[in-house]
Image (spheres, rainbow, N blue to C red):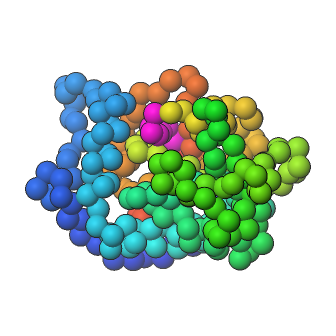
Amino acid sequence: MSIQMVQLPKPEIKNKVNNGKVPKRASKGKVEMTKSEIRSQNKKIRNGLTDDQINEYSKRIHERLFALKEFIDCQVLFTYISFGSEVDTHEIISKALEMNKHVYVPRAEDNELNFYKINGFDSLIRSDFGILEPDAAIHNKYISSLSANDKRLMILPGLAFDRKGNRIGYGAGYYDRYLGNFSDKEWLKLALAYDFQITNKLTVDIYDVPADYILTPDKLIICKE
C-alpha cells in the first residue's frame, strides 16, 4: 500500500469532561465496561470537543484519507453524513463528487439501512433526529449488481474501536446488518475515529462486522494484516 502522510502538530485536548482530561482506559483487574457504558463514556468525551478541535482533527483525517490509494482508486463511495461531534464527512463527500466518484449516503427505513446516490447536498432532507439524509422519492437506491466490478469503499462511523477493527456503534446495528448481506471481498471498510476512541480490545458479537482500516488524526490502523 502506498500511503503518503502529512505530519501535523497535535493540538491540545481540553475537554469539559473529567476536569478537561480524557479518562484513562481501565487497567488489568478492573471490571470490563459494557457496550452501553463505553458508548456513554465516549459520546460524553466526544461531545466535549470544541468546534475548533473537531475541525482540526477532521482536517487531519481528510488529508490522510485523500492520500490513501484505497480512496483515490475507489469508484463507489459509501459514507455516513456527519452530525454533531462526529468526524466530519461533508468535505469527504464534496471531494469524492469532485473526483467523479459515485457517492451513496444512508437512510434508515423500517429498521434497516439503505444507501441512496447523491450528487450534492441541496436535495437532502432532515430526519426526525435532525440528521441529513437522502429523499427516497428523488434519489436512486443502491443496487449491488449495478457495481459488481467496481471498487467500493465504505466509511463507517462509531463510538469505539479496537485494533482488530471491531467497533461499537450507536446500538441499532444498522451497519452490521447491512454489511452482513455482502461478502468481505465486496467492500473495503474504513472507520473514521478520534484517537481517544481506540482501545486495546472490545467484546463483540458474532454478527458484528469489523473495519479493515481505522483512520484517526494521528495514524492509520491496518486491521487485517
In the image, is 150 to the left or to the right of 3? Answer: right
Name the magenta segment's main secondary structure.
Answer: loop
Residue 167 lies, with reference to residue 47, above or below; the image says above
* Residue at x-position 49% and y-position 37%: 166
Magenta-span inclusion, residue 84: no
- Residue in the foreground of this view, choosing between 151 and 122: 122
Quadrant in which the C terminus appears: top right
* Residue at x-position 50% and y-position 33%: 172
Quarter occupied by residue 26: top left
* Residue at x-position 82% and y-position 44%: 144
Task: Residue 90: give x, y in percent of width and height.
Answer: 55, 68
For this orientation, the residue located farthest to the left is 19
Q: Is residue 224 visible?
A: no
Q: Is residue 9 visible?
A: yes
In the image, is 183 to the left or to the right of 45? Answer: right
- Residue in the foreground of this view, choosing between 218 and 140: 140
Magenta-span inclusion, residue 167: yes
Task: Residue 89: give x, y in percent of width and height.
Answer: 54, 64
In this rendering, the count of numbered labels is: 0
Quarter occupied by residue 74: bottom right
Residue 96 lies, with reference to residue 193, above or below; the image says below
Task: Residue 139: give x, y in percent of width and height.
Answer: 76, 56
Q: Give the magenta range.
A: 163-171
